[in-house]
Image: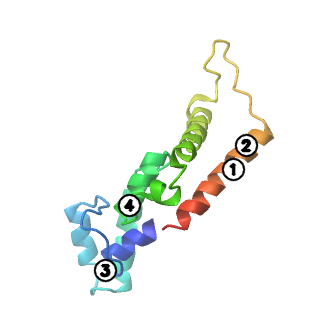
Amino acid sequence: MLDRAVDILMGRLNVAASSKVGLSFAAIGKIMTAGPPGSAAVEMSARSYVAERLGLETYQRPDDIGAALSMVGVPKIWSTAFPVDAHPRKTALGVIVSRRNRIVHQCDLDPLPGGTTTPITSSDALDAISVIEGIVKELDAHC
């Protein structure tokens, strides 16, 4: 995503007029004055500002991933990558992200009373990895 956004800013990739990455006018001004047009200094400045902007979001949830890719000229990624079965894939990813967030932000405590952690097996983890790998491979083929 970072590479596509920089390519758009550098004029190497044309995308729909509605694509945006949300850079401030100050950032655009600094990018434009970083050096001669098309120079490595301009590209490094663009890469720095875009990376900083993209770092503000997590892009973990399916709709956030779709919005992020749309921002850099890859519209409707879910229906394109999975024309028949996007909803089950998005749901599976959403479940994995929710569990990840519970692990990170709530010590993976079981929502039921008792204060124990939610059980997880190596098979659960491997299944989650497999789901994510399959989704990433399919999305990547359309980016």
Left or right: 26 as drawn, with respect to 136: left
Q: Nearer the viewer, mark 4 or mark 1?
A: 4
Q: Secondary structure at mark 1?
A: helix
Between 63 and 34, the one lying in front of the other is 63
Q: Residues within 10 Å of mark 3 (few under 14, many from 20)?
A: few
Q: Secondary structure at mark 3?
A: loop
Q: CA distance from mark 4 to mark 1?
A: 25 Å
Residue drawn at x 61%, y 35% is 99
Q: What x and y, as percent, mark residue 104?
A: 59, 37
Numbered circle sitting on residue 15: none
Earlier in the chain: of badge 4 and badge 3, it is 3
Earlier in the chain: of badge 3 and badge 2, it is 3
Q: Amino acid at mark 1?
A: Ile
* Contact check, label 3 and label 1, Cβ < 8 Å: no
Q: What x and y, as percent, mark residue 141?
A: 55, 68
Q: CA distance from mark 1 to mark 2?
A: 6 Å
Q: Amino acid at mark 4?
A: Pro
Numbered circle sitting on residue 125: 2
Q: Amino acid at mark 3?
A: Gly
Q: Mark 1 — residue?
A: 129
* Contact check, label 4 and label 1, Cβ < 8 Å: no
Q: CA distance from mark 3 to mark 1?
A: 36 Å
Residue at the extreme top of the image, as rendered: 113
* Contact check, label 1 and label 2, Cβ < 8 Å: yes
Q: CA distance from mark 2 to mark 4?
A: 30 Å
* Contact check, label 3 and label 2, Cβ < 8 Å: no
Between 140 and 36, the one lying in front of the other is 140
